[in-house]
Image (spheres, grey):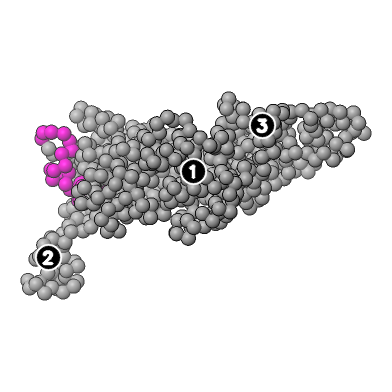
Amino acid sequence: MIFRRLYGSASAQRGSPCYGYPAPERNPGVGLPAKMREPADIGASAPDRILCSEKKEGVMKQYLALYRENRPETFSQVLGQEHIVKILRHQIATDTVAHAYLFCGTRGTGKTTMARILAKAVNCTSESGEKPCGVCDTCRDIAAGRYVDVVEIDAASNNGVEDVRDLRESVNYPPVVGRKKVYIIDEVHMMTTNAFNAFLKTLEEPPADVIFILATTDPEKLPPTVLSRCMRLDFKRVSGREIRENMRRICAAHGVEITEDALALLAMNADGSVRDSLSLLEQCMSSGEPLLDRDVILEFLGAASVEFYADLTERTLEHDVAGALLLLEEALQEGKDIRQLMHGWMEYYRSLLIAKFVKEPQDMLNMSLENIDLLKEQAGHIRLEALNRNIVTLAHTISDARYSTQARILMEVAIVTIAEDMEYAGQAGTQTGGATAQPRRAAEAGRTSGGAATGHDVSSRRTKTGSPGRSAFPRAPRQEMPASNNSRLPKSAEAPAAEQNAGTEPAARAPADSSDRLDEIWRDVCEADGLSQNSAGATMRNARLASMNDSEFKLIVSGDMARRMLERNSEQICDLMEQRTGRRRKMVVREMKQEGNRSKDERLQQVVSEAADILGTKVDIR
């Protein structure tokens, strides 16, 4: 329990470690039994050498990882968070420090480090200069984890009401040695709802000498009652330039030679995280290589070179499926990671897109000038439509690979799809999430021949103008009706149907879908972010999309409570369905028992309505 850990023994007051900090160094032999103390002679036993921190030859120094060794200790050493440093510096100088802070941001951007620096600043004993000074006893104790008035709590493992009750008891005691008692609660979004409710009153009105610093990577999971009680500071991703400069400085301090291409590659893979960049750098430095260049970095990252992606892209553009598959096989035999290859190929297509439009893309691309020239030449041979289609194909492949144990097969399907100018259908087609592809060359031939625009062409124009094409969902593939179906039409309907087939079909018209297709559409809607965080999400997953036409879609639910829940969220559900299908429809919710009690005439009328939507004409029953 927090209270007992801080004040339960005299050893804690002498400097027991705070949560998340390493144990303090101990004087050799102090407090140990006589047989465990270091003997006077040089020939000490092995257990004695392990237990004691000092030896007669010198001090045993614990090895620290690069990101711990180079952790900032003052505001001036923080990378890439100048907007937050400016706020905190002003508050320290004017003595207007808030009682609760919420530090938000992705991993490795300095949330916990900034919290510790703030704790040093409010307790720093330096009389002059900027606080924290980093050299006084208080700053040193906080950095070493020996300061009893700075408490770090991991909310991932201390997330219950009992833990909050202990916290509320401990805040009533004044600081032991410092001016402020600081509680740093990391991963605060992992706390339970009951724990948040129990914490609200203490968070809103803590004692005057207590500061709470909450850190999280997912602020959306925090209740609004907590967000409104804290000063929120958002940490941004650190720029690649600052990450490269930081790694260059560290390599120089360790006597390691590293090239600019290698630094740029490490910074790109770090994705704005300083900790990730130093972890990758430490992995490469541990190899003992005298020179860290781009090839060495690629070897340790399991990534492929730019030349590999250029060759793979060239073979797919030449419709050389066999050559592209063999090239992938060679890369996998060399130990490359298949998912890393997917992301790398996606990044290469992004580079092609930038090279096609940006005149001087050197500052935006992590490539040498020779590779950029090759990129520009290759981008000039790719049509914009094909470039866009291939990027979407790779995006769907990466998304499907997250839930598949056969990522290699998905990558091979993507290669065939791109090489044969086909449309990747992603999870459509099977209930098990298999990938299918649909030919596109016929549609392209129709457009180049000067004929009427096809449904896909209309869809492409709608995307450029910014309507339904902005959706994050893949547009449903068009299903062509067999010509033999016309023979079943009444004579009065044959002519309009022929005219409709001969002309241009409206892009927004939705054909009747099979049960598998409806299930796939509804699964995509349920997996969207719009309703995943409220109670309607579970209800949606238990509902079934029974039918869909031009004007409405019908959901079947188990009971009255589920029906009312979906009707309360009808606007959001209709928005998600519009994003998924490209057309605004009305939602109709039916209970399972209501569906079973429908009359024969009602069911027949629905069939007629769906048939009319398919054929684009009026259908009569005789």
Q: Is residue 505 above or below residue 151?
A: above
Residue 10: percent from the left, percent from the top?
18, 55
Q: CA distance from mark 1 to mark 2?
A: 55 Å
- Would residue 170 appear left or right of 344 to someone viewing this image? left
Q: Circle 1: is it few (<14), some (14-19), or many (20+) Cα within 10 Å?
A: many
**Amino acid of disc 3:** Thr
Element under disc 1: helix
Q: Residue at x 19, y 29 (%)?
A: 93
Q: Nearer the viewer, residue 227 or 416?
A: 416
Q: Residue at x 62, y 42 (%)?
A: 421
Name which of mark 3 and mark 1 comes first in the sequence: 1
Amino acid tagged 2? Lys
* Relative height, residue 182 to residue 579 (above, below): below
Nearer the observer, disc 1 or disc 2?
Answer: 1
Answer with left or right where residue 9 lies relative to residue 221.
Answer: left
Q: Is residue 551 visible?
A: no
Residue 346's tag is 1
Tell me if residue 404 comes above or below residue 207 in the rendering.
Answer: below
Rendering coords of residue 315 (x, y %): 54, 47
Precedes in sequence: disc 2 or disc 3 = 2
Q: Answer with the quarter of the image where residue 478 lies.
A: top right
Identify the image quadrant of the C terminus: top right
Q: Which residue is mark 2?
A: 55
The residue sitting at the right extreme is 622
Left or right of 111, for residue 423: right
Stretch of the chain drawn in magenta: 127-151
Examine the residues drawn in magenta and state their main secondary structure. loop
Where does label 3 land, which residue?
A: 448
